[in-house]
Amino acid sequence: MADLKFSCPQCRQHIKCDASYAGLQINCPSCQKSIAVPAVPSVVPSGERVIQIQIKVSTLRKTAIGALCLLLAVGLIVWPIYLFVGTRKMTFKASVDGTDVVKLRGNSMWIEHLSWRLPERINVNGKKWVPQWNGDLSARYTLGWGATHRRAANIKLTKLVGRGTITILELPTPANQETLSIQMDDSDFGGADWYQFAVSW
């Protein structure tokens, strides 16, 4: 066995003895006082330390993968609910001279022009839109996911800009194929003005 090296607690004499004496009482060769030989220090071989670290890394990896799978599962459940049940919003802005009706059905939006000049400089959800016109009827604009589910009780219209009125002309019902109609009326004023609103459902 290996030798133990320690000091006498009484006289500080350096002592060296066989490791088999660990834990036993001996007499100090210098001061002859009875002293206890210290225990052999436990040494973890370097190979075992590597194994312990590898176990910890693999445990962390498994935990991270499990957490990621859980987040993906929650996302797969919550995202469709948000798309079909959660609150959705659309903003509309245009230069209006006369009366125009913005219509929303499913994931489509279009404009029916009623009087004076066609609306210009149109923005939908902050994006410029230059629609093609067939007389007083614009081409359709595709809004995107989640726009198809509008419940009349949840619809909220907020006027942001405009000197005239912005009102809900018609709520979605089975009779009108679930179409929401919002009218911007500038007919009481001369020239065009900016109109902007936000509608959520």
Image (tube, rainbow, N blue to C red):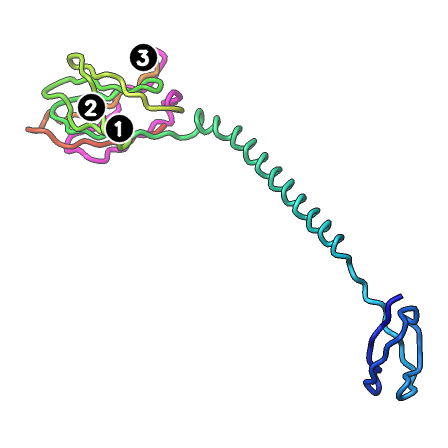
Q: Could you tell whether 111 is left or right of 180 in the image?
A: left
Where on the picture, by quarter, is residue 61? top right
Where on the picture, by quarter, is residue 65? top right
Where on the picture, by quarter, is residue 98? top left
Residue 191 place in picture, x, y as percent: 7, 29
Q: Nearer the viewer, mark 3 or mark 1?
A: 1
Residue matched to label 3:
176
Residue 66 place in picture, x, y as percent: 62, 37
Asked if disc 3 and disc 2 are in contact, CB closer than 8 Å, the reply is no
Alpha carbon separation for disc pair 3 and 1 = 23 Å
Q: Quadrant of the N terminus?
A: bottom right
Asked if disc 3 and disc 1 are in contact, CB closer than 8 Å, the reply is no
* Helix, strand or loop at mark 1: strand
**Identity of the residue drawn at 86% across and 71% down:** 3
Q: Amino acid at mark 1?
A: Val
Q: How many marks?
A: 3
Circle 1 packing at 10 Å, graded few (<14), some (14-19), many (20+), is: some
Q: Is residue 106 or residue 145 the one in the foreground? A: 145
Q: Among all residues in the image, which is located at the extreme top?
A: 175
The dot on residue 124 is 1
* Helix, strand or loop at mark 3: helix
Alpha carbon separation for disc pair 1 and 2 = 10 Å
Q: Is residue 57 or residue 83 the one in the foreground? A: 57
Q: Amino acid at mark 2?
A: Val
Residue 70 place in picture, x, y as percent: 59, 35
Q: Quadrant of the C terminus?
A: top left
Asked if disc 1 and disc 2 are in contact, CB closer than 8 Å, the reply is no
The dot on residue 130 is 2
